[in-house]
Image (cartoon, rainbow, N blue to C red):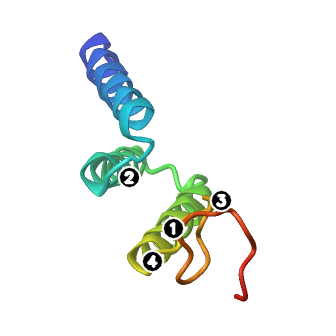
C-alpha cells in the first residue's frame, strides 16, 4: 500500500472515530464506502480469504441497521417498546 493510500485511510479512520465519539453513532455514509473499498481492494488483489469475514461484517451491519430502523438499538436503556428510558425491563 502506498504512503498516499495509508494517509487517506488514516484520515478516514480518524474522521470516523471522531464522529463516533461525538455522536455515539457511525452513519452509513461513513460505513458503506469503507466496506465497498475493502471489497474492491481485496478483489483486485485476487485474495478471496477475506470473503467470510467481509460477509460477517456486512451481515452484522445489516442486522444493526434493521434494528435501528425498528427503533431498537443495541444495549441502550429504554430499548423496549414504548419505554421512556427508565431502564426497566418492561413487559417486552
Disc 1 crowd, CA 10 A, few/some/many (<14, 14-19, 20+): some
Q: How far, Cα to Cα, is label 2 from label 3? A: 24 Å
Q: Earlier in the sequence, mark 2 or mark 3?
A: 2
Q: Earlier in the sequence, mark 2 or mark 1?
A: 2
Q: How far, Cα to Cα, is label 4 from label 2? A: 17 Å
Judging by the rendered image, the residue that carries numbered circle 2 is 35
**Does residue 24 lie above or below 76 as drawn?**
above
Check contact, mark 2 vs mark 1: CB within 8 A.
no
Disc 2 crowd, CA 10 A, few/some/many (<14, 14-19, 20+): some
- At x 29% / y 20%, what residue is drawn? 11
Task: Tell me where residue 64 appears, x and y as whole percent.
Answer: 51, 67
Judging by the rendered image, the residue that carries numbered circle 4 is 66
Quadrant for the N terminus in the image: top left
Q: How far, Cα to Cα, is label 4 from label 1? A: 5 Å
- The answer to which quarter of the image holds residue 51 is bottom right
Check contact, mark 4 vs mark 1: CB within 8 A.
yes
Judging by the rendered image, the residue that carries numbered circle 3 is 75
Secondary-structure class at tag 1: helix
Q: Nearer the viewer, mark 2 or mark 3?
A: 3
Task: Tell me where residue 70 appears, x and y as whole percent.
Answer: 44, 81
Judging by the rendered image, the residue that carries numbered circle 1 is 64
Q: Nearer the viewer, mark 4 or mark 3?
A: 3
Check contact, mark 2 vs mark 3: CB within 8 A.
no
Secondary-structure class at tag 2: helix
In the depicted view, which residue is nearer to us: 72 or 47? 72
Amino acid at each position: 500500500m502506498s504512503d498516499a493510500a495509508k494517509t487517506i485511510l488514516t484520515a478516514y479512520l480518524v474522521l470516523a472515530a471522531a464522529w463516533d465519539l461525538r455522536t455515539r453513532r457511525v452513519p452509513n455514509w461513513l460505513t458503506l464506502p469503507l466496506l465497498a473499498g475493502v471489497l474492491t481492494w481485496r478483489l483486485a488483489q485476487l485474495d478471496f480469504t477475506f470473503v467470510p469475514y467481509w460477509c460477517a461484517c456486512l451481515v452484522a451491519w445489516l442486522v444493526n441497521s434493521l434494528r435501528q430502523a425498528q427503533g431498537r438499538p443495541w444495549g441502550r436503556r429504554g430499548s423496549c417498546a414504548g419505554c421512556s428510558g427508565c431502564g426497566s425491563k418492561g413487559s417486552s
